[in-house]
Image (tube, rainbow, N blue to C red):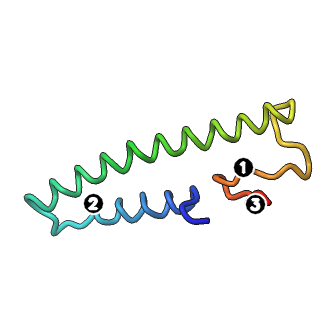
Amino acid sequence: MKNKLIDLNDHLFAQLERMGDEDLKGKKLDAEIKRSKEMAGLGKIIVANAALALNAEKFKAGGDSLPVGQALPVMLGGPASV
């Protein structure tokens, strides 16, 4: 499966590196600023969705943590359903 939270992390840090380019000016800088804002907004939604999935699994397990042997949801890197 592609697009795990670690991939989001990599994309956000790559964008941070692009924003740190001191030669970026004018329209190119404006485009990167806009892209950064959009990526940050989407990133927040993705993280909130993952937190909801994890909390749902904890709720199903009847506690604040997953029991030993309980897999993480697929979206968080857990195994795919069989």
Where residue 39 appears, as percent x and y from the top left, is 36, 51
Q: Say left or right for 49 vs 59.
A: left
The residue at the point 91 percent across, 49 percent down is 68
Residue type beneath disc 1: Pro
Q: Earlier in the sequence, mark 1 or mark 3?
A: 1
Residue type beneath disc 2: Met
Q: Earlier in the sequence, mark 2 or mark 1?
A: 2
**Direction left: furthest residue:** 26
Q: Distance between the residues labelled 2 and 1?
A: 33 Å
- Against 26, residue 59 (above or below) is above
Where residue 25 appears, as percent x and y from the top left, is 11, 62
Image quadrant occupied by the N terminus: bottom right
Q: Residues within 10 Å of mark 2 (few under 14, many from 20)?
A: some
Query: Which residue position is annotated with label 3?
Result: 79
Query: Which residue position is annotated with label 2?
Result: 19
Q: How far apart are marks 3 and 2 (CA)?
A: 35 Å
- SS state under label 1: loop
- SS state under label 3: loop
Q: Quadrant of residue 79?
A: bottom right
**Direction front: furthest residue:** 82
Q: Say left or right for 70 vs 79.
A: right
Residue type beneath disc 3: Pro
The residue at the point 75 percent across, 51 percent down is 72
Q: Quadrant of residue 5?
A: bottom right
Image quadrant occupied by the C terminus: bottom right
Q: Residues within 10 Å of mark 1 (few under 14, many from 20)?
A: some
Query: Which residue position is annotated with label 1?
Result: 73
Q: Which of marks 3 and 2 is nearer the N terminus?
A: 2
The residue at the point 16 percent across, 58 percent down is 29
Where residue 51 appears, as percent x and y from the top left, is 63, 39
